[in-house]
Amino acid sequence: MAEHNVSQTRLYEWLTGDDDSRMCDDIPESACDEQPRNFFLHIWASLGNKLADELSSARLVLPWLMGIIGAPIWMVGLLVPIRESGALLPQIFVAGFIRLKPKRKWVWVAGALTQALAALALAVLTLFARGTSGGALVLAALVLLSLARGLSSIATKDVLGKTIAKRRRGTLMGWSGSIAGGATLVAGALLMLFESRPGHLVVAILLAIAACGWLINAIAAARIEETPGAIEGGENSWDSIKLGLSLLKDDRTFLHFNLARALLLSSALALPYIALLGQNQSGTDLGGLGILIVVSGLAVMVASPVWGKRADQSSRGVMRDAAIGTAICCVMGASLAWLPGEWTHSVWPYAAVYALLVIVHHGVRLGRKTYLVDMASQDNRALYVALSNTLTGVLMLIVGGLIGAFAQWFGSGTLLLMLAATAVGAILSTHQLPEVE
């Protein structure tokens, strides 16, 4: 056992680039000895979560599911807003509840298990549901999955802040993203091989694997050694909202961060429309879906460790650079929609731009997550995360609806140019944020 612990510590020091595994900035001293072990448990948990997220993606997999069961097109347009806002909106209401728990990992475990059950429900619906009623059941299962995702999200960041020290968190998220990207790459490659198989069976298998991913997430989270935290300050929902609004007024850095985060939504909102342009070339062919999953997994596997290392040095710089990449990718995607030539009638050019945008989108995610966790303290981290995510959820619902209307009126190409302009605003905003590392 001691030999295993030494090997684990050495691997931890190699992955983080440290010679001393006891560098424990801003975490309790009692958590310091457990940091290498917790580091790898976080990686396992993140692997399960990220793999499950990709294999149940509202941008790729669930639209195929809706097409297979013959659900109305207007229901397809609700997938991304429900997935994103459902996970973000309720968080301010549960922040006070979570703060009453000295160990928050059990909230994380409950959320992961609920997501696993919702994914299994989606797998069953893929096999047996049909038409409008089937589509409504899919949306209902997605609501449950999204609410559970929000519960896990806030608890995950709180546990991360208590168990992994500053200047290690971005590295952790980078390596876990890379490993999950590799697993997603394998899943997409297999999907390309099975493109001639019945679509409903293949998608059901993907969703069943996603359920297993969340089960892995729950098991790993349950094994994390978490030092009990302070439980003072737990409020009811209304008190949490009032305290959160006062934080926006008093903490100018937090307010500025949320403005920058709102502008950075352009990367998330652009992804489905670039994928949609590619899908228009390949229809509902599972081979086209497999290609997009493969390039997405490859992009994450390559990019995540780089973004993670850079986020530990300057998460503000990562957000700024990812905003620059978002603007470039949106312009490239719009250009493909208007360029002549047979080569634009294949899914591959769109897959290439999609992969580049996935790379920069993960820069946005890693940068803002690391910035938010490092900006907050142990006492207010759960509330900061919850408030920021709730604000983003509201914006996602409002902006998502407007974006859908713009796409209907002006087309995906023009919409991507609008999102490129939003990304330029994000560049300016993130550049002016203070450093928190």
Image (tube, helix red, strand yellow):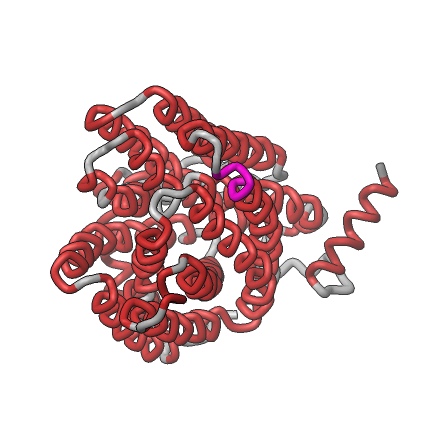
Identify which residue is drawn at 57% across, 33% down: 216
Image location (x, y in percent) of residue 212: 54, 30
**Which residue sits furthest top?**
128
Q: Is residue 135 left or right of residue 148?
A: left
Position of residue 178 in the picture relative to residue 284 (left or right): right
| Residue closest to the far left | 409
Picture coordinates of residue 335 (x, y %)? 31, 73
Can you give x and y, in whole percent of width and height, for residue 136 in the image?
A: 22, 29
334 magenta-colored: no
Asked whether 99 or 178 is in front, the reply is 178
Q: In this view, does 363 lie to the left or right of 47?
A: left
Tell which of 168 and 323 is nearer to you. 323
Q: What is the x, y in percent for residue 101?
A: 45, 35
Residue 368 appears in the rendering: no
The one of 351 and 256 positioned closer to us in this rendering: 351
Which residue occupies 15% across, 64% down? Answer: 410
Q: Which residue is drawn at 52% across and 40% down?
A: 191
The residue stretch that appears in magenta = 191-195
Residue 359 against residue 434 in the figure, above or below: above
Outermost front residue: 342
Q: Is the magenta stretch mostly helix, strand or loop?
A: helix
Quarter of the picture holding the N terminus: top right
Numbered-mark total? 0
Q: Which residue lies furthest to the right in this view?
A: 3
Query: Which residue does the image show at 37% across and 27% down from the upper left?
Result: 126
User: Which of the 4 image quadrants contains residue 127?
Assistant: top left
Q: Is residue 213 visible?
A: yes
Tell me: 66 left or right of 365. left
In this view, 307 is above or below 230: below
For residue 10, what is the image quadrant?
A: bottom right
Q: Nearer the viewer, residue 199 or 134?
A: 199
